[in-house]
Amino acid sequence: MALTSAEFDRQFKASTKSGNQRLSRQPVADAVRYDRRLRKIVIGLSNGCTLLVPPELAEGLSNASPDDLCHAKILGPGTSIDWPKLDVQLSVTGLLNGHFGTPEWMAQLDNGSGESVARRARTKQRRLKAKR
């Protein structure tokens, strides 16, 4: 059954309205940069909060150079962050929910050790500081 033009328009308007309502309720990125001193990706959010993400947690960014990490940009209405040189895109909602990549990547981060991802990231940061 073919969709009529009128029905398409109705569905398009309803979907657009729904999407705009959802975007107005969730924080989106309005700024992104890599802080070399902190070694963190800094994402400014529309609700005034700031999200700091250790690159070693994010799939595709764990081995990236600081220069590559500095070339991040916001996609669309702020729902995703893109690193074009690395061909990596991460969703802001996913990051806020602690999803740093595919289920396989997350399982690899967990590594069955029972240790939290955040705790391992802090341990890694302490090791890096100790090497200086």
Image (cartoon, grey):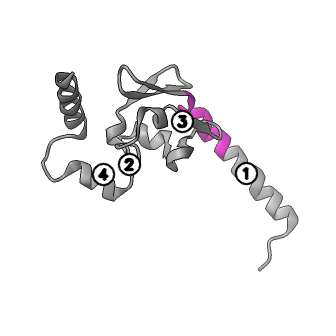
- The numbered mark, 1 or 2, whose residue comes first in the sequence reads 1
Q: What residue sits 46% from the left and 35% below the top? A: 69
Separation of marks 1 and 2 at Cα, in angstroms: 35 Å
Stretch of the chain drawn in magenta: 19-31
Q: Position of residue 79 (x, y in %)?
A: 57, 40
Question: What's the residue type where badge 3 is placed?
Answer: Ala
Question: What's the residue type where badge 1 is placed?
Answer: Ala
Q: What residue sits 41% from the left and 48% below the top? A: 60
User: Which-is-in-front pick, marks 1 and 2?
Assistant: 2
Residue, far right? 5
Separation of marks 1 and 3 at Cα, in angstroms: 32 Å
**Viewer-closest of 73 and 19:** 73
**Eyeballing the image, is 8 above or below 18?**
below
Secondary structure under the numbered disc 1 in the rendered image: helix
Would you say the residues marked 1 and 2 are in contact, meaning their CB atoms lie under 8 Å apart?
A: no
Q: Which residue is mark 1?
A: 14
Q: Which residue is mark 3?
A: 72
Secondary structure under the numbered disc 4 in the rendered image: helix
Q: Which residue is mark 4?
A: 106
Would you say the residues marked 3 and 4 are in contact, meaning their CB atoms lie under 8 Å apart?
A: no
Q: Which residue is mark 2?
A: 59
- The numbered mark, 1 or 3, whose residue comes first in the sequence reads 1
